[in-house]
Image (tube, rainbow, N blue to C red):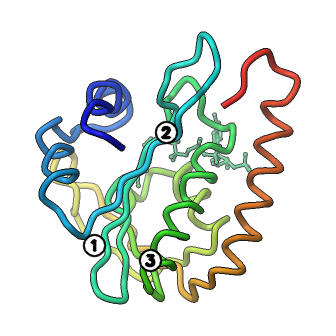
């Protein structure tokens, strides 16, 4: 993710998150957080938004944390979230992290399904963690970050992505 991506990231952010992060948070993450690594999935297709998904990972010693991940709402369910998530896991593995943590709203069944499919397990619950509606957070961790296994996961996700997008007039 580059600074010039922030307006388009914000357009997605405002549609998918309540409350949304501000553009200032993204600026600080990119400019002033030496432990953060943000990525976007860019499209090359005519008529597609130029950014289809985005997310980040923080390195905190040998543990990494995913503070945010999102797919453009018009393109959800097409495995872009899986693709990005595995990339973020690979970044963490390459930084020497052994596990990745995250929090997710207990009502966010789509995200929870995504995380489970990629090896995250539930390790706890923070009551009333989200102040906008007093919702609990589920704490999830993916243990055992093995680079070779993650590369195999990425290859599998890429094959699914190709199946989904192949045959369409545009591809990511
Ligand atoms: C969670 C999120 C990142 C998933 O991204 P995505 O690109 O849709 O993810 P994927 O296509 O890889 O699929 C995720 C799984 O969610 C479910 N899912 C995805 N899209 C769906 C849809 N439109 N309808 C029903 N289920 C859907 C499915 O279980 C899917 O797996 P499957 O198709 O293999 O069974 C995306 O929904 C999103 O941006 N949500 C809003 C922001 C958010 O909640 N972020 C997570 C904060 S913790």
140 vs 146: above or below: above
Residue at 21% over, 39% down: 19
Q: Which residue is mark 1?
A: 126
SS type, badge 3? strand
SS type, badge 2? strand
92 vs 104: above or below: below
**Which callout, 1 or 3, points at the residue further toward the start of the chain?**
3
Res 53 label: 2
Q: Nearer the viewer, residue 51 or 141?
A: 51
* Residue 165 image point, x, y percent: 78, 31
Residue 146 appears in which quarter of the rendering?
A: bottom right
**Which callout, 2 or 3, points at the residue further toward the start of the chain?**
2
In-image side of 25 versus 138 (left or right): left
The answer to whether residue 171 of the structure is visible from this angle is yes
Q: Which residue is mark 3?
A: 100
Q: Nearer the viewer, residue 31 or 165?
A: 31
The answer to whether residue 70 of the structure is visible from this angle is no
* Residue 102 image point, x, y percent: 38, 68
Residue 6 appears in which quarter of the rendering?
A: top left
Please tell me how crowded label 1 is: few (under 14), some (14-19), or many (20+) other residues with Cα within 10 Å. Answer: some
Please tell me how crowded label 2 is: few (under 14), some (14-19), or many (20+) other residues with Cα within 10 Å. Answer: many
Mark 2 and mark 3: span between their CA atoms?
19 Å
Q: Which quadrant is the C terminus positioned in?
A: top right
Residue at 36% over, 89% down: 62
């Amino acid at each position: 993710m580059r600074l010039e991506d922030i307006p388009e990231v914000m357009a997605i952010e405002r549609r998918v998150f309540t409350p949304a992060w501000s553009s200032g948070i993204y600026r600080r993450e990119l400019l002033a957080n030496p432990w953060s690594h943000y990525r976007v999935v860019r499209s090359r297709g005519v008529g597609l938004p130029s950014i289809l998904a985005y997310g980040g990972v923080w390195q905190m010693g040998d543990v990494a944390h995913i503070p945010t991940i999102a797919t453009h709402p018009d393109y959800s369910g097409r495995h872009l979230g899986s693709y990005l998530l595995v990339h973020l896991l690979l970044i963490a593995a390459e930084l020497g992290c052994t596990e990745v943590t995250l929090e997710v709203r207990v009502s966010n069944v789509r995200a929870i399904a995504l995380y489970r499919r990629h090896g995250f397990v539930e390790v706890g619950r923070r009551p009333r963690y989200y102040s906008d509606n007093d919702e609990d957070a589920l704490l999830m961790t993916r243990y055992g970050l093995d680079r070779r296994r993650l590369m195999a996961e990425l290859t599998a996700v890429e094959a699914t992505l190709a199946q989904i997008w192949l045959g369409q007039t545009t591809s990511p």
